Amino acid sequence: MSDIVVTREDGPTGGRYLTTIDGHTAEMTYSKAGATRLIIDHTGVPDALRGKGAGQALVQRAVEDARAAGVKIIPLCPFAKAQIEKHVEWQDVLA
């Protein structure tokens, strides 16, 4: 998974994480809840990328960014919530 490049588009009220593999783009969107919390509200992974680690890479990048910024994550998206529950080492960023 380390070879998956994830980019972040950040705006005043939210943003998204993106990765493109073999011409297919996966994304995870978030909203900002004040200055200290991010709400992950959607993860979309095309069928062509399922099982390739794209979705997990998006969540991992959000976790890393949250740690670096000192913010907490509220995972409303079922996929993001499941990934964070599965990775105990990521749970320190849960709100």
Image: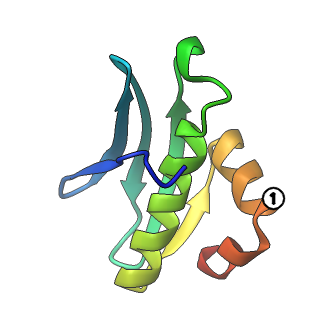
**Occupied quadrant, residue 26:** top left
Q: Residue furthest front?
A: 3
Q: Amino acid at mark 1?
A: Lys
- Above/below status of 27 relative to 61: above
Look at the image and tell me whether residue 7 can be seen: yes
89 on left or right of 69: right
Q: Is residue 95 visible?
A: no
Who's the residue at 60% across and 47% down the image? 56
Image quadrant where one finds the C terminus? bottom right
Observer-nearest of 43 and 76: 43
Q: Is residue 46 toward the left or the right of residue 86 in the image?
A: left
What residue is shown with label 1?
A: 86
Which structural element holds mark 1?
helix
Q: Quick check: 95 above or below 61?
A: below
Residue 19 is situated, as x and y percent measured from the top left of the image, at 37, 37
Residue 71 position within the rendered picture, expressed as x and y whole percent measured from the top left: 44, 79
Residue drawn at x 52%, y 43% is: 41
Q: Residues within 10 Å of mark 1 (few under 14, many from 20)?
A: few
Examine the rendered structure and indicate whether residue 76 appears above or below residue 90.
above
Residue 18: % across, % down: 35, 39
Quarter occupied by residue 49: top right
Residue at point 33%, 77% (across, down): 35
Compared with 20, 67 (above or below) is below
The image quarter in which residue 16 lies: top left
Residue 63 locus on image (x, y percent): 52, 67
Identify the residue at image location x=42%, y=49%: 30
Image-based side of 85 in relation to 21, left or right: right
